[in-house]
Amino acid sequence: MSKMQLIVKGLIKENPTFSLLLGMCPTLATTTSAVNGMSMGLATLFVLVLSNMAISAIASYIPDKVRIPAYIVVIATFVTILQFLMQAFTPAIYETLGLFIPLIVVNCIVLGRAEAFANKNTVADSALDGIGIGLGFTCSLTVLGLVREILGAGSVFGFKFISGDGILAFVLAPGAFLALAYLIVIFRKLTEKKA
Amino acid sequence: MAMESSFKNMVACLLVICLVCSALLAGVYAITAEPIAQAAIAKTNAAIAEVVPSFDGEPVSGEVEVNGKSYSYYSVSKDGKVIAYAINASSVGFGGSLNLMVGITAERIVYNTSVLSQSETPGLGAKCTEESFAGQFAGFNPAEKNLAVKKDGGDIDAITASTITSRAYIEAVKNALAAYDAIVSTIE
Amino acid sequence: MEYILIIISAIFVNNILLSQFLGICPFLGVSNKLSTAVGMSGAVCFVITLATLVTYLLQVYVLNPLGIGFMQTISFILVIAALVQMVEIVLKKVSPSLYQALGIFLPLITTNCAVLGVALTVVTKEFTFGGEPHMLNLAESIVYAFATSVGFGLSMVLFAGLREQLSMNDVPKPFKGIPIALVTASIMAMAFMGFSGIVK
């Protein structure tokens, strides 16, 4: 697989949100606006790239039976580092995303990539894989956030284009499920034609 | 490729990973502790500056107790005279606690308010942070107007469909006024 | 009285699946059949309550006194992983029938964000049950954790029941599987929104 393909596959073929349906909790919870969705995606990207690199570097030294706990410790370390960095430099975003930053530890995407890709590939390839999947996740979250923001608040990235309110339900829980359902349907329709 | 899964190997491997990770975390913690503390101070200072008139020098922090509840406040002065207090007051809203910074001038007029933290419903109660609602408190003189929502016979327009949040906001401002009275009485 | 508020709030008002979005993976993953949904709910209920008890004690008696709060995430997830393993081993020995019922779900629970989510919420968030905002004490934490997992079970079982009915219907092809389940979840979330505001 070429380097380019490693990155691109995460956007469409192995898109974690719309195609593999992984990491649904942050996807639904943090996409109340496009900016929030994008921040969550980038935070996950950060952890994904670093943990992928670290795990591919040390994978050959880890006995097979304890690999999962070892991976979890590595991932949790990077998540905690991310928490510190965000508290220090982007406190406002950290507060908005709240609980879902430490919960990146249990995001199946991160552990899934460690298990499926990073532990049997080189450090460089694992980094690219992390970037690809992370970008795919970021794009999906941004799109979902954008859709919910447009419908729910009548604004794009915080800029209002209609006066008054949108359809409030889309900012709240029911709209999260509904918007995601329709985006998956649209994604399936689009990729179906390509294949 | 992977190492043999003998008991010794497994224990040693996990131990090394845990030690390295803890050391790494402790290191990053030590480096970021300072910026994190500064970010918190910067946030408080920004909130103070937002709710009081322009002042010189540093805000002076203090604590005051009203009805068994303690409030932290910051007094700001200009030309050596205290001109206003920024009081950290809270109340219980619709989704949880609502935490405000309320600026009250020496004339006992609410200069401005700012939301420090809230967990109200997005799109409904969360609108309490917006100018259309919060702006009503800027320059509010409790001696002339009634601090309550219009539904309760007061002078504040409640947020549409979020009366509980609006009442909680007013409650927090009232708490701040009570704390203000306590501060002033201890000084005099 | 306060305990009743905690229970109602955790089960209905702030339902962990439909309003907090924690534990969505098993919610979508193992809700095809009613029986597996019941099994999963039972296992989650057990682990969440136990994990919250242990992590609460860990936070209050180890992390706080030592001033190493920064190890919170990493130590909590390790405790949960170890606990799940232990429950699996103990259950296998003590009650093989219960193990048979819950066994296959146990390994999945480590990466269920509901468990870590509740454990972290309990030690970091201030609650406003019965007036003043305060941190939960041990008993309240356990009640909160248990009630939350009952809420998980409730929506899980309701959802599985709906999906069993759905599978017999003719759904448009692109909607098959997860999308139609999400639409169902959306309508359920709307119904649960009706509870909001009954507990402050």
Image (tube, grey):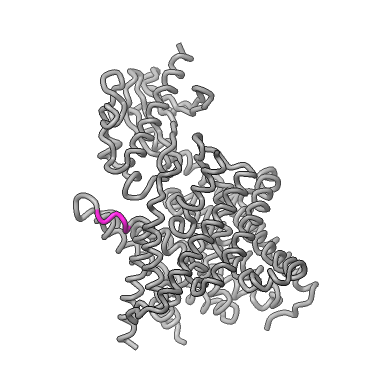
Q: Residue at x 44, y 37 (%)?
A: B92
Q: Mainly helix, strand or loop, the magenta region?
A: helix
Q: Position of residue A177 (x, y in %)?
A: 38, 64
Numbered label tally: 0
Q: Position of residue B64 (x, y in %)?
A: 50, 23
Q: Is residue C115 left or right of residue B129?
A: right
Q: Residue at x 36, y 36 (%)?
A: B114
Relative depth, front residue between A53 and C9: C9
Q: Position of residue A98 (x, y in %)?
A: 47, 52
Q: Quadrant of residue A112?
A: bottom right
Q: Is residue B86 above or below residue A171?
A: above
Magenta-colored stretch includes residue C99: no
Visible residue check, residue A135: no
Q: Residue at x 37, y 33 (%)?
A: B49
Q: Is residue A128 left or right of residue C146?
A: left
Q: Residue at x 55, y 38 (%)?
A: C1
Visible residue check, residue A11: yes
Q: Which residue sits furthest top?
A: B188
Q: What quarter of the picture does the C terminus of chain A occupy? A: bottom left
Relative depth, front residue between B67 and C167: C167
Relative depth, front residue between C80 and A88: C80
Q: Position of residue B61 (x, y in %)?
A: 49, 27
| Residues drawn in magenta | A166-170
Q: Which residue sits furthest right?
A: B8
Q: Is residue B67 above or below residue A18?
A: above
Q: Is residue A91 above or below residue A105?
A: above
